[in-house]
Every structure is written in C-alpha cells, then in structure tokens.
Image (spheres, rainbow, N blue to C red):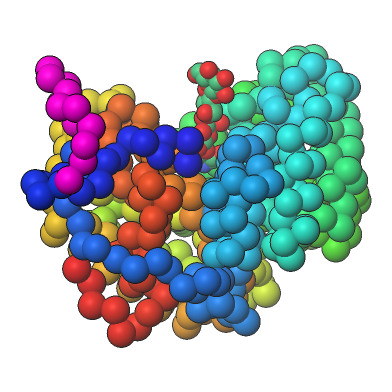
Amino acid sequence: MAALPLFVTGCGGGGSSSSPPQTGVTPPLVPAGPSLPPLPSGAIRTAYAGQFAVGAALKPSEVISGSEAAALVADQFSSVTAENIMKPEALAPTPGNYNFGQADEMVDFAVANGMEVRGHTLLWHRATPDYFFEGTPAEVRARLETYIFDVVTHFKDRVQHWDVVNEVVADGGGGTAPYRDSNWYRAAGGPNYIDWAFNAARAADPNAKLFINEYSTEFAGKRDRMLGVVQDLLARGIPIDGVGHQMHINRTLSAQNAFDALQAVDNLFAGLVNHITELDISIYSDPGSCFVNGTGCADDIGDALPASWRRQQAQLYRDLFNGFLTFPSLLSVSLWGLTDDGSWLNTWPVTRTNYPLLFDRDGAPKPAAFAITDPTYEIQ
Ligand code: G3I
C-alpha cells in the first residue's frame, strides 16, 4: 500500500480544503464507487473457516511489522503465498548459495499470525536462473533434487503446501504435449523432471502436501491435458496430493467454468485435494491474441471504472465463493495479490489500470469483499 496518496477523497465540490489551488495539475480522480463501511474484523477468513483457508499472494513490503498492509493481511486472511520471493531466482540466484532472508520473514509472519503457507514454487520454466538447465540430464537431475530437498527441508513444518511444479502442461496439442516444451523438458530430456521434483519434495518433508499448479484449468482443453499428466503420475506412484488451479479469470467468465475444474479433479476419485491458488478477476475482457502477443487488448479505462463492471466482478466473486463451499475437496482459495495497485495485471498482458482484487488502491474493501462475506449485502 505504498501508493496510498494515489487517490484523493472528497472531490466533486463542496470541499473546504484550504490548500491553494493547483494550476495546470489535474488531480487524480476517485474511481466512482459506493461508499462502504470498514470490513468487519476477520470477515473473510471467518466466513470460510472450517471449509477452506483464504489466502493472498504477498510482497515483502506487505508483511512489515506495523504496516497497514500487514495488519490487513493478518486480520482478514488465513493463508499466505509469496508472490515472488520463494521462486528459484530469489532463493538460489547462484549455484549453492541460498538466500532465505526475505522468505523467512514472510513465513515467520504467517506462522506468528497462525496462518498457513503455500510454498510457490519449486519448479517453473520462468524465474529460474540459467544454471539450473546446464549439463547432462543426470547433472540437471542432481541439481534439481538437491535444490528441492534443501528448500523444502529449510521450510519444514512452516510451509504446509508446495507448488512442486508450476505450468508444466502444454497450451495446445502436438509436439511435446501434454507436456510444455520448456527449458526443463529439454534439459531433462523429457518429462522425467516432474517425477524428480515430487520425489525430492516428499523425501524432504513427508507431511507437506504436494501440488501441481496450472493455469486455464477452467477451460476443457488445458484441463484435460493437465488431468492426463496427473493420472500418469498417480498410476506410477509419484507422490502428488493435489491440484492447484491458478484461476486468473475475467469478469465475463461463468462461475461454472471454475466449478468444472474442481469437479474434474474430484471425478478422478484419487483422493486429491483442490486448491484455488492465484485467483483474480480482471475487469478487462480480451481476445486470445492479447495473451499470445499483446494485440487486440481492451483499451485502458484508467480511473473510469464502469459501475456495471464493478458489480459484475463482485457478483462473480460471490458466485465463485458460494460454489466453492459445495466442494469438500477444496481446502484453500488464494487471491493473487492484496490490493488492486499491487496486481501483476496492471502491467500484463499490457500496461493498463486494472481492478482485479478485493481491496482497492487505498487498501479499502471493495464491493467484492462484502459480496463474499455478507450474504445480505446488495451489490452496488
Ligand atoms: O524486483 C524487480 C525490480 O527490482 C526491478 O526494478 C523490476 C524491473 O523489471 O523488476 C522487479 O522484478 C519483477 C518482479 O515481478 C517484482 O515486481 C520481475 O521483473 C517480474 O518478472 C516479476 O513478475 C512476476 C512474475 O510472476 C514472474 O516471476 C509477477 O510479479 C508475479 O505476479 C507473477 O506470478 C505468476 C505466478 O508465479 C505463476 N502464475 C502466473 C503468475 C502471473 O504471471
């Protein structure tokens, strides 16, 4: 919430400010929105207690003791994910040299506040130094196993869930599908690296729950490829406990798509747990080309968020969380960020102002936050 001064309040006339008029400066606009009371203490985490944990992906600045952000997190959430600082490039920037400082601070914050931690992520084709991919497949394997064993051991008993592999599934058919044609696939000489990763994590901490984490599981094609990979792992006795559905969606998606993803995992009857790991709801509805090459993306609306979009987003959050309650296999739902200004969606797939989360740029609760915590709240 470092950007608190971004918005001024009370514009629209009638103000009694004694500040001198600022000539030639256009003050930032307050996004049109209903005036809302504070969110009751603990509203989000207690609304779903006993069903699933509710988490947020955090930056180091959001767990600094005494900060507004840390107070908000501790009050409202029951799980923490490090947005970036537990990725390989952060934990092991050079071979054999671990850099656990910031991650330890975040994990210790979670433990001190009685929160769960989702470790994200032990293996990804991004955010990983090049040295991980050097040498023969045997060398790549030994390095990966050592890294995973060391990291999981370091956080043993403090991190309950690990995204062991992230985004290993192909976006389409052909080629290496169902596996992504990635630096990992090429360095290992095939998909065996997935087995190596899960086995190393299990060896380090038999109690941690181990996940495959994937995006677009709300769509049948990607989902089916992911399920094929999971079934193969299960059939060969690779230790996998659950499926993480990232769930980066937009306000026009039907909630049913998300439920289909959870149901598909249940339909395997393998006892797997479901987690929603990176939920956010973009207010932009884009064509596929926007995500492939950044073309055709919806125009930046800046501060002019249409009220109908805000309502649609809040309703979708409500529909999702209501439906989530009907899945006993769903044990964790995490938002990918805390406040709208900190979201990755302000710079991806193009730079534009987005409003995807539950708290606004002032750290104040949005209609979506009330929609998922108060059944009597009429979405405005
Ligand atoms: O911290 C540096 C800063 O010092 C530097 O000045 C700046 C210049 O680019 O970069 C900063 O690092 C950026 C980092 O985010 C922190 O803001 C990296 O460039 C940028 O690549 C990184 O992006 C993250 C991305 O993963 C890649 O690791 C996003 O914040 C993060 O939200 C995103 O998260 C992923 C999940 O891990 C997996 N699922 C998809 C999701 C969204 O892409």
What secondary structure do most residues of the magenta stretch adopt?
A: loop
Q: Would residue 16 be seen by someone viewing this image from the given angle?
A: yes
Assess whether residue 29 is covered by the magenta stretch: no
* Outermost residue to the front: 18
The quadrant in which residue 269 appears is bottom right
Assess whether residue 27 is covered by the magenta stretch: yes
Measured from the top left, where is residue 328 in percent x and y?
Answer: 57, 81
Q: Would residue 221 be seen by someone viewing this image from the given angle?
A: no
Q: Quadrant of the C terminus?
A: bottom left
User: In this picture, which residue range is highlighted in magenta?
Assistant: 16-28
Measured from the top left, where is residue 243 in percent x and y?
Answer: 60, 59
Q: Which sits in the foreground, 356 or 293?
A: 356
162 sits to left or right of 69 = right
Q: Residue at x 28, y 36 (%)?
A: 353
Q: Is residue 340 above or below residue 33?
A: above
Q: Residue at x 23, y 32 (%)?
A: 19
The quadrant in which residue 349 appears is top left
Measured from the top left, where is residue 16 in percent x and y?
Answer: 17, 45
Q: Residue at x 48, y 50 (%)?
A: 338
274 sits to left or right of 132 = left
Q: Residue at x 90, y 46 (%)?
A: 153
Measured from the top left, where is residue 122 in percent x and y?
Answer: 72, 40
